[in-house]
Image (spheres, rainbow, N blue to C red):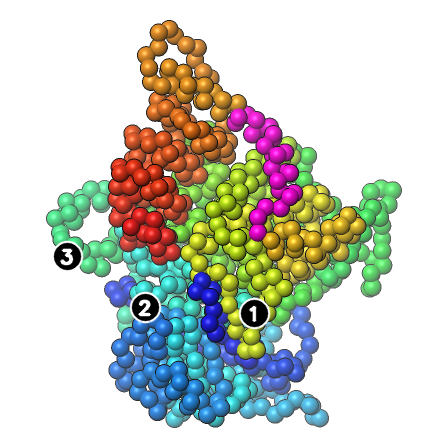
Amino acid sequence: MEPDADDLPLRANTNHILVRHYVLDLAVHFDRKVIGGTVVLFLEPCSSSGSAKEEAGGSPGALECRSRDADEQEDATIGLAETPTRAKNRCAGRERDAPEPRAPPGSGSAHAAAESGGSPSPRSWEANSGGDFTLLLDCCDLDVSKVEEVDVASASAAPGLLPHPVAPEGSAVPSVKPEAAFVQNLLSVPAGQWRRRQQLLSLCSRAPGAPGGGSLPFRTDRWSLQVRKKGAVSPRDFPRVLRICYETRPEGGSVRWTQDQDNRVCVYTAGSPINNRALFPCQEPPVAMSTWQAAVRAPSGCVVLMSGEEAAVPVEDGDTRSLIWHYYVTMPMPASTFTLAVGHWHQVTAENAPTLERGLRDKAARSNAAKLEAGPAELGEADLMSGLGSSSSVAKGSPLKTGSSPAVAFCRPQESPATRKAFIFSEWLEGNLDAAGNPLERSCGDQTTRSFCQSSAGDEGLSLTDYSGTGDDAMSCSHGDYPCRFTERSARTQRVIPHRVFGPVCLLQKAQMAVLDLLPRCLAAAHTVLGVHPFPRLDVLIVPAGFSSLGMASPHIIFLSQSVLCAGTFGPREDALSLCGSRICHEIAHSWFGLLIGARDWTEEWISEGFATYLEDIIWAQAKQLSLQQTADQSDLKALLRCRRLTDELQNSEEQLQVLRPNLECTCQVGESGSSTVKHALNPDKTFMQVHYLKGYFLLRFLASQVGEKYFIDFIRVFVEKYHGQLILSQDFLQMLLVTFPNMERKGLTLGAIYADWLDRPGIPKWLYERNAVWSEARLVEEVKAEVGKWILLSGSPQGKGRKRKRAEPKVNYKEVTSEQLVMLLELLLEEEELSGATLEALQRTYDLQNQDAEVKHRWCELVVKHSHARAYGDVEHFLVHNQAMGVYLYGELMVQEDREQQTLARRCLSLVQEEMDQSARRVVEEMVL
């Protein structure tokens, strides 16, 4: 495979064999900046003639998802914890065989094959294959020391494990090895016994290596780990359970080693374009859906946050004086969604924020002089890791701060399969209602069904269908067998899931005032708009300043940038929290679009980002309880701002990066083995583009305008009911929409037309040009234009030019504006060729611009740079240091002016943050500045 330089290879041969479950046993070493341990892979071969389950002797056919309630009383005799030294013993081969020198990227690393003591060359590896099957895993920047087959036979003999399945008499299923049958039986434990399945997988992962097997032959190159077993010529012959011993590298692209805002060491998965392949060897194509469980050892002062269905309570490891944190997931998801963060963070509560912040300031004052006297060489890990209190004690003992919501009466609905709901919905839209306004009864198979699209929202709120009181005990899901929350009555009535907020001590008060206060409202609003929360709990972490975006959503955890915490003093408090609230709603929306429903082809990322951007406005309006008119006004203003941003981006980017479906008709096509590439994934320019967010958002607004927004939102609910737990392509959503609303095709809006206008073509669609003119005359926009006129008049007056006035001039009264209006006001002022320094100072005073949110401050900094307003260069420096996710292209504006003072400012800011910046951001900025 020779992909273009900016394409990301997906090397895993997922058409041959799939990883169904990962068991990770990891230890975090801050002194060396590595994470080391083992990952155990439970594998299932694929077959062109039938499913892997059928091949191993299991029963064919679709599996119906079940509630996890059946397993709640299961006897948990097999625990997840192990002996404290198991990680050391597991990789004993690493001590017996001295590790080889670290290989540079692109070359082989370790290779434990008997015939070679070093890494074989590609030619040698192929020449010695002997026709054996090769397992390919996506892997990068990992030092692999050993790959071994797990002795499944010894594990299967343990008391309490499952018996081997017996093929029925006369069955056409081919005979399989008992070990393979045992593993398949283990993977096929029904969802109703999910806890027992986790325990059995954990126990099996601790089995020793196969007797006499030693290390299997393996080889690493730049993008993959390749493993063979002598004599295993097909996926069916290959071992079903592998253990890989490895360590990450400090420079590995999947994790960030840095310091938090309290100057204490931490590490987290940063949402890198290469995903998690530099954290553990895995299968990265989205189709490789798997579950996982992990034990993570970290220093006793740390908190370990991870994708996991229960908030972990750490247990002490007596041998190492570390804490072990256990997490697991039961919903199969792509390995790219796995998320980990380890640091000295504290849980945010209403009580602890001010106290801890005062304590931190006092501690800093006492130790500042001593630390300044100490040289850099004297400040080791102990200094960096020291701090106020114990984070782990917070995680152990602090009560879970969970939002409350009014009790909602549970009403048992008419039972009907989810697959018929789109049909019922379309009948309702066609006007098939009785005289009382109720849907006509229609026979759909086993019983009469009724439309469920009746709004219960109040007149003053956003008119949305509220499903908080509905449930369907007989619901049949279309996904594979896992404990699905959509089948749980309690989940359907749970408007606010348990949630926690973590962050550095210095930001606890800001996080409490913004994130902790907003979360319950945003979660309840998301439930009203989208229904059942896909995940049972949520952690939110305020990540270090070098984080490359405003937020990132993963299963059970959201990362938020400190930039969203900057609440200003101007305007009502609700408006000051607008950036934070809308970003929280965006990330919460990803629980449904991006995680619960994912793109089958990663190039169609608009399915995740476009939906989240569209839904964030709806959820945030619901959280604020805006009236219909207020919601419409805000929507028009935001649409205009986004249209301006999209227009600017498309004018300054390559056309090939503007297409939402870059593979066109080849979307989701892979090689014979399942390998493929993600087009442009490694292009540094694409990292900072928002075309998938914005163009995807406008596509959904366009579709909503064709059918009516309320009907469109209700349709999204139906779509989620049908496709939750699955991967989709653009056509899945669009075809179901066209079937549900047949009038769209009658008006000429076909699937091909949508592809041509929105997905397969660069530039801006005609509809968006037309709507932009309408949004430009919206009420809130007209208010802004009036204020802009006042500032332009002031700039041209003697007062605005800083001259002494001969006579008193009438005082100008400036209208109070919202934060979004203020962004628009500054953008319009940026179009002026000249604004005097006195006008800029008046602008700064009037709107208290230093204390506004990051979106406002960004535009203010652009004004300062454009007009060389030297008195406010301090604001620019503060913004670039504290809002690194948003300041990348501000460096370019500083450099392009060819002003020596501005260029010096750019270089100084880069030197201040260079070490903590995201790698992609740093490369882009260094190209501009250096």
Q: Nearer the viewer, residue 248 or 344?
A: 248
Task: Specify the amino acid type for callout 3.
Answer: Glu
Density class for disc 2 (Cα within 10 Å; few <14, some 14-19, many ≥20) is: many
Q: Which residue is drawn at the image coordinates 46% and 72% (left, top)? A: 2
Q: Earlier in the sequence, mark 1 or mark 3?
A: 1
Instruction: Determine whether 743 is above or below 861 in the image.
Output: below
Please state which amino acid type lies under the numbered disc 2. Arg
Residue corresponding to mark 1: 287
Question: Which residue matches tag 2?
Answer: 249
Q: Report x, y in % for residue 172.
A: 69, 90
Q: Which residues are magenta?
A: 762-785
Q: Is residue 692 magenta?
A: no
Which image quadrant is residue 167 in? bottom right
Residue indicated by mark 3:
378
Q: Is residue 389 visible?
A: no
> What residue is rendered at 49% in x and 22% in y?
789
Judge depth for marks 1 and 3 and give the one in front.
1
Q: At label 1, which amino acid type do we have? A: Val
Image position of 502 (left or right of 412): left
Which numbered disc flags the more N-terminal residue, 1 or 2?
A: 2
